[in-house]
């Protein structure tokens, strides 16, 4: 039996109003049209749904039995329509690691697949993870690392309750997962007055007598901390994230300081600073897409396919442990 949802909606509205005139007004149709829809539904079902007399309108026993399933049927129909509308809604992606220009990587996959996304700034990984869990955004993009501990209010990244994750580092907690989509080499960025500024390439170990400059508080930049720990760089200088220009100005004026910057990210042509490739090994920065496990946006799957194709075409996931360096959590996230 094929039910007409317009007829079912006419029935539920009348059952809730118990008045044909009010039900017709609620549906923005004439009372005559409402009566015809209900009559056709009763004919299809082979039973009366309402008793009508001079005292008003009442549900029959059959009408009472039909009311709740009818409401569920309409809810399912509304959900089906909403799913199509959701498919047309842009995918909202919150970014972090702003100085490393994460949108460059996403834009290549998005343009290749012809997708529509809505980029938005996220303060850092913990704040983006919290927004995902609240349903305030659809996905996050940046470097995913262990978040440590969860705050007393349930906000990732603050002191308090422990945040669970699996051995591979792919689950930030019970509600989020991520996929590694790109490994990007990083260069060293330093002042032209730095003692190593004339080199054509540098090994990370050659930077041990220099000061690693952070564009934000030291405890918020997991990749730089792991780099410094691994290569024995003990002097570190944290700061406030006041933008790329401010950061470059700081490097330009201090000949002992250096930082790391993605090799494929375009640098402005500024006097007083230069970038130099790092070799033996080359550090790689791991970009990942992060999303909720439940109720993912319909455009997530085509975006992931686009990342897979772009990685294959541009060799985004190439990693050779003989020549490259990745922090432990990033190695664990490598595709099998």
Image: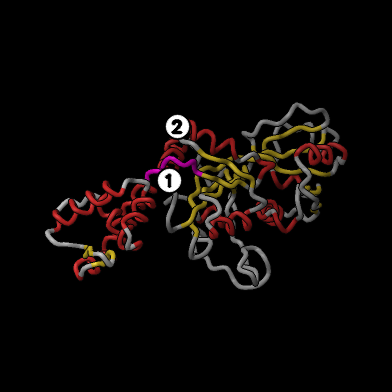
Q: Which of the two residues, 237 or 302, is positioned nearer the viewer here?
A: 302
Q: Position of residue 204 (x, y in %)?
A: 70, 45
Task: Please check the rendered image and state whether residue 88 is part of the magenta-colored stretch, yes or no.
Answer: yes
Q: Residue 20 falls in which quadrant of the image?
A: bottom left
Instruction: Count neighbours of disc 1 (C-alpha within 10 A) and say few if under 14, some if 14 to 19, many if 20 or more.
Output: some
Q: Position of residue 331 (x, y in %)?
A: 53, 53
Q: Image check: 46 left or right of 117?
A: left
Instruction: State whether residue 72 appears in this view.
Output: no
Instruction: Count neighbours of disc 2 (C-alpha within 10 A) and say few if under 14, some if 14 to 19, many if 20 or more.
Output: few
Label ID, residue 235? none
The span shown in magenta is 84-91
Task: Tell me which label, 2 or 1, sits earlier in the chain.
Answer: 1
Q: Image check: 73 left or right of 146?
A: left
Task: Please check the rendered image and state whether residue 210 is part of the magenta-colored stretch, yes or no.
Answer: no
Tally of numbered discs? 2
Q: Is residue 166 above or below residue 28?
A: below
Residue plotted at (65% across, 53% down): 124
The extreme left residue here reads 46
Disc 2 to disc 1, how far (Cα)?
17 Å
Secondary structure under the numbered disc 1 in the rendered image: helix
Q: Give the foreground label among 2 and 1.
A: 1
Q: Which of the two residues, 236 or 22, is positioned nearer the viewer here?
A: 22
Secondary structure under the numbered disc 2 in the rendered image: loop
Which residue matches tag 2? 114
Which residue matches tag 1? 86
Instruction: State whether residue 122 appears in this view.
Output: yes
The extreme front residue here reads 54
């Amino acid at each position: 039996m094929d039910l007409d949802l317009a007829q079912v909606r006419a029935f539920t509205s009348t059952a809730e109003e118990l008045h044909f005139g009010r039900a017709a007004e609620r549906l923005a149709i004439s009372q005559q049209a409402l009566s015809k829809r209900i009559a056709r539904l009763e004919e299809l079902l082979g039973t009366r749904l309402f008793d009508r007399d001079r005292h008003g309108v009442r549900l029959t026993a059959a009408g009472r039995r039909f009311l709740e399933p009818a409401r569920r049927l309409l809810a399912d129909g509304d959900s089906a329509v909403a799913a199509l509308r959701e498919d047309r809604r842009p995918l909202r992606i919150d970014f972090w690691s702003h100085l490393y220009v994460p949108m460059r990587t996403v834009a290549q996959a998005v343009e290749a697949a012809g997708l529509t996304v809505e980029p938005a700034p996220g303060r850092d990984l913990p704040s983006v993870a919290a927004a995902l869990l609240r349903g305030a955004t659809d996905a996050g993009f940046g470097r995913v690392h262990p978040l440590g501990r969860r705050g007393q209010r349930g906000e990732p990244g603050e002191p308090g309750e422990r945040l669970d994750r699996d051995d591979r580092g792919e689950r930030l907690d019970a509600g989020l997962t991520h996929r590694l989509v790109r490994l990007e080499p990083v260069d060293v960025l330093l002042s032209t007055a730095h003692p190593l500024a004339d080199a054509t390439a540098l090994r990370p170990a050659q930077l041990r007598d220099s000061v690693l400059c952070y564009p934000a508080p030291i405890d918020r930049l997991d990749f730089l901390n792991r780099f410094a720990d691994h290569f024995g760089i003990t002097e570190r200088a944290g700061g406030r994230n006041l933008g790329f220009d401010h950061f470059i100005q700081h490097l330009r004026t201090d000949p002992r300081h250096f930082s790391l910057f993605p090799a494929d990210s375009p640098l402005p042509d500024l006097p007083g600073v230069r970038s130099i490739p790092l070799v033996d090994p080359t550090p790689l920065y791991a970009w990942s897409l992060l999303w909720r496990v439940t109720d993912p946006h319909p455009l997530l799957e085509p975006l992931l396919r686009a990342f897979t194709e772009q990685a294959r075409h541009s060799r985004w996931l190439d990693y050779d442990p003989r020549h490259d360096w990745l922090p432990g959590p990033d190695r664990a996230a490598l595709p099998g």
